Amino acid sequence: MHMADALISPVVGATLWVAAGTTLTYCSRTLRQDRQERLVPLMGVLGAFVFAAQMINFSIPATGSSGHLGGGLLLAILLGPPAAFVVIASVLAVQALFLGDGGLLALGANICNLGLFPCFVGYLLIFRPLLGANLLCRTSRRISVVTVLAAIISLQLGAFSVVMITLLSGISSLPFSGFLLLMQPIHLAIGLAEGLATAAIVLFLQRARPDLFSSASRATSINPLLAAFGFAAACIAGVGAWFASTLPDGLEWSIAHAGGRVEPTNLAAAWPAVDAGTSLEGILGAAATLSLILGFGFLLRLRHKS
Amino acid sequence: MNDHLVQASGLSYRYPDGTQALQEVSFRIGQGEAVAVIGGNGAGKSTLLLHLNGSLQAATGEVRIGDLKVAIATLPQIRSRVGMLFQDPDDQLFMGSVYDDVAFGPRNQGLPENEVAVHVHAALATVGASHLADRPPYRLSGGEKRAVAIAGVLAMAPAILVMDEPSDGLDPAARRRLINLLRSFTHTRIIATHDLDLVLDLCSRVLVMNRGCIEADGKPETIFADTELLARSQLEPPLSWQRRPEHG
Amino acid sequence: MSRFDDTLHDLHALDSHAARPNALTRLDPRSKILATLFYIVAVVSFDRYAILALLPLAWYPVALAALGNVPPAALGRKLLLALPFALMIGIFNPLLDTAPMVDLFGISISAGWVSFASILLRFALTVSAALLLVATTGFDQVCVGLNRLGVPRALTTQLHLLHRYAEVLAGEAARMVTARELRAYARRRLNLNVYASLLGHLLLRALERAQRIHLAMLARGFDDEVRGSQELGWRRVDMAFLTICAASFILARSIDLPRALGHILLKALS
């Protein structure tokens, strides 16, 4: 799920941007070093593929609801984690800039949630270790099960991350435990859909283009730095989850006192007080402001047309 | 030795899935010749063309462009001499504006930006697309895309033009403009095509391919008159030669 | 099918506004990118109950839309389409935060509704700013601007190619989906097998296309470095634009302008 700018505070947004930016820079550098220039058009076109594929829905077996492909895990399987991360980031960026999905401040957060977890945890720490480098000698069932597992875990981590980010931003009133109880089951279903879709496509590709999975150019060893990174991300998420689950009230308490969020009682200045006189002041002011702005805009358009 | 010379000797190529795409293909094409490569689908036309600029490396046999043998080491020079136009212009127009796309080649050649501008404007003027310089590729018609793709190749000043189905998908007017344009060039032109009427208008020599081999090599009029050869190669005489249906 | 059409339309409609030159398109893309980022940070930095104080910041999208010749209806439509997520999370605020906060002509409004309204307002402002960035600059120029601001070339090339081929791929996807629908009779939705096959074929075609593009790039001398024109000129007007924007954002953030305006008006009327 894409987070929106409206629900993120600048501090949290900026922090996540730093995380996303650092990872993107690291991935770009890795790709440059590998000098695989054939990857350039491949990444672009696969990004376009994911973009298009997200518009096609399928019905999830036995639930009656529909889902669509997120694409992070599939990209990681096809391109490896660094390239896949860059591609997912680009798809999210285009969605933010053109469709208003998510926002530019939240883009950093969305890149982390929807990119880090599938590519560096789902693929690197689950899919790859359990299935090995050569998919061709694995049974369909095993591939399906591992893919679904990787997808579910990635999405659960992503959902948890969304909850934490929203909580730390302090703009939504959702309580931690309530939000968590809402998000995790929903993302279980979404994770299942993602896993099934990804597995089905991987199996299709295996039959149609076995050469994709057995080419000699595929890296056969897991980059230790990437693995450490993914492991760290999973640990942080895991510790956070444990902490939150054992001390839910404590977490809320500590955040409320640490984040310097403004409490409702201090906000008389942001909205006219209950007194009717100053209420009128506020409404007059609002009306005047809006009229000025709209008038300004109207004048600009008129000037332009002449 | 002449840069415009294209020579293939004993060229053979097998696809990874085992299909033999080319078998012992040999020919020699001289400066300024306009040669058509015709044949049914799967005859090996596109595969042959891809060998001419080193996109595919032959298993046996060789291709020479002028005095240079096509090999990994000589690819940059080969690609400066041989300009290739692919079948789908969308695959070739990958930059954000027509100008940037036509400039792609000269920039890769390392030219300074003012020289790039000269080449780009000259190429666009030649194909009649100067007014499209700032357009993004997705706002071009089929004929315009084709023209811009040609400009992109011309901007690198190649000696030889290799084209895969250049008239494919063009409306009659755009097709006619293409034929006139290609007729005006002095480059060596090698064209793989199903459009036999274009061949009549443009080419002085025809290579007929069938199942990876060159079945025949001669003048268009001679080749097209040989109905048995054409039938064997999944072809028919040019449409302009076929009897017009009776009007009722 | 219409979902594809809408999205494709969105991809190129925004860009098309920037194709017609106006005062804004002539600005250096970097100034617009930076102004947009400042703007979003400014909007988002207000506290959760701010509504009145946010209003003055609406001048930025309104002015951009006017100067950039972007019809308000087009912008409004896109805002509506993007609304659901903010709505879904935001709607919990009124449900959970029920402490009364404001008395508006006798009706008591809870804090939850106030923060909900604030969320919607922020949403409208930030999404408009993002959309207007592309509408007044053009996506390719945004990529060039990002490059010059320090974003690695690999990333901007990726953005550029994605944008370039999104329409092509979406077109292929749309045709495949339609072709399937025409033979699907009553079955409206795809089951997993058909879906995997459809997407699998789309993916194969994408891979083949990538291969062809790669050959076309190599044929024109590509060697891993996509060189663009990169010619940008930072002029006084760019500095002026950025300064005016930043100053107004800081002003709006520091002073509750509507309140002050209302105060003055009341004084004048009484």
Image: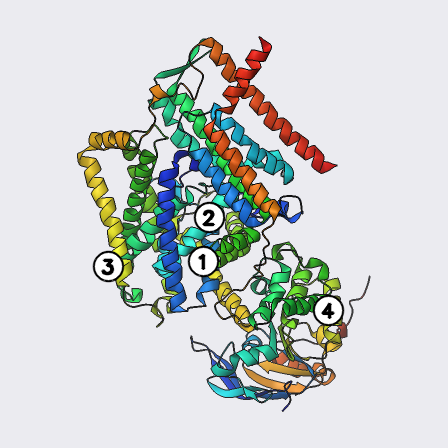
Which residue position holds label 4? B126
Q: Which amino acid does label 3 sit on?
A: Leu
Res. C105 visible in picture: no
Q: What element carries label 3?
A: helix
- Whether marks 3 and 4 lie on the same chain: no
Alpha carbons under labels 3 and 4: distance apart: 58 Å
Chain bearing mark 4:
B
Residue A102 at least partly seen: yes
Q: Of the two numbered discs 3 and 2 on the same chain, state the one appearing first in sequence.
A: 2
Are circles 3 and 4 on residues that touch, CB within 8 Å?
no
**In the rendered image, which quarter contains the C terminus of chain B?**
bottom right
Within 10 angstroms of label 1, few (less than 14), some, or many (20 or more) residues? some
A174 or A281: nearer the eye?
A281
Circle on res. C152: 1
Whether tag 2 and tag 4 are in contact, CB under 8 A, the answer is: no
Q: Which amino acid does label 2 sit on?
A: Ala
Residue at image position (40%, 49%) is: A69
Q: In this view, does A220 lie to the left or right of B66?
A: left
Q: Where's residue C241, x and y in %?
A: 58, 41
Say which mark, if any, is on residue A93. Answer: 2
Query: Pointer 3 and pointer 1: residues touching (CB < 8 Å)?
Result: no
Q: Which colour scheme is used?
A: rainbow
On residue A130, the disc is 3
Between disc 1 and disc 4, the foreground one is: 1
Foreground label between 3 and 4: 4
Q: How far apart are marks 2 and 4 (CA)?
A: 38 Å
Q: Disc 1, disc 4: CB below 8 Å? A: no
Residue kind at label 1, given as amino acid type: Pro
Residues at marks 3 and 1 on the same chain: no
